């Protein structure tokens, strides 16, 4: 009986990722593994199962109706630029700013040490 088993290096080459990434996937249990002594091996069908399970299937996209953009956030409709932010009203005071303001003799806010 011959059983083909893959090493971590083999999997890294097949998936075109680093060995560290493969070790992380094995540790998280994303890929089923087989222990032979202290060596980690993976059956090809277990790797194929992982690939099938995580595959993102693309679907054909038709034309976008003109009114579909009305519901999108501004970031998609303004060329990636966010609108200007309103000025900050309630700024948090830190201990250092409170000490600095009291050192100047002008205590502000309701900061209690």
Image: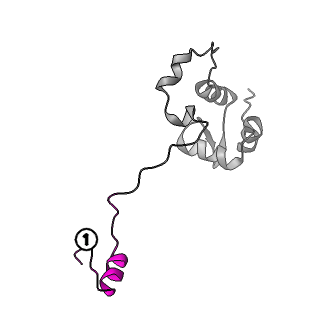
Q: Which residue is mark 1?
A: 109
Please give the count of numbered marks on the rendered protein. Answer: 1
Tell me where residue 8 appears, x and y as whole percent: 70, 43
Which residue is located at x 70 percent, y 47 percent?
Answer: 19
Report if residue 67 lies within the magenta region: no
Q: Is residue 63 left or right of residue 72?
A: right
Which residue is located at x 34 percent, y 57 percent?
Answer: 89
Tell me where residue 56 appears, x and y as whole percent: 61, 25
Q: Is residue 94 left or right of residue 3?
A: left
Q: Which image quarter: residue 60?
A: top right
Magenta segment range?
A: 89-113
Q: Secondary structure at mark 1?
A: loop
Which residue is located at x 46 percent, y 49 percent?
Answer: 85
Scheme by which the image is coloured:
one colour
Which residue is located at x 56 percent, y 45 percent?
Answer: 27
Please identify the quadrant where the C terminus is shown. bottom left
Please identify the quadrant where the N terminus is shown. top right
Q: Magenta residues: mostly which secondary structure?
A: loop
Tell me where residue 59 appears, x and y as whole percent: 62, 16
Report if residue 92 lies within the magenta region: yes
Q: Is residue 72 left or right of residue 95?
A: right
**Pointer 1 local density, CA inside 10 Å: few below 14, some 14–19, many at least 20:** few
Q: Which image quarter: residue 62?
A: top right
């Amino acid at each position: 009986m011959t059983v083909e088993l893959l090493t971590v290096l083999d999997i890294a080459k097949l998936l075109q990722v680093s060995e560290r990434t493969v070790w992380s996937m094995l540790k998280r249990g994303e890929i089923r593994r087989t222990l032979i002594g202290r060596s980690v091996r993976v059956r090809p069908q277990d790797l194929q199962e992982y690939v099938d399970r995580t595959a993102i299937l693309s679907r054909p996209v038709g034309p976008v109706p003109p009114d579909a953009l009305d519901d999108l956030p501004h970031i998609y409709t303004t060329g990636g630029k966010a609108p200007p932010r309103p000025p900050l009203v309630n700024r948090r005071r830190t201990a250092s700013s409170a000490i600095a303001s009291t050192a100047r003799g002008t205590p502000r806010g309701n900061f209690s040490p």
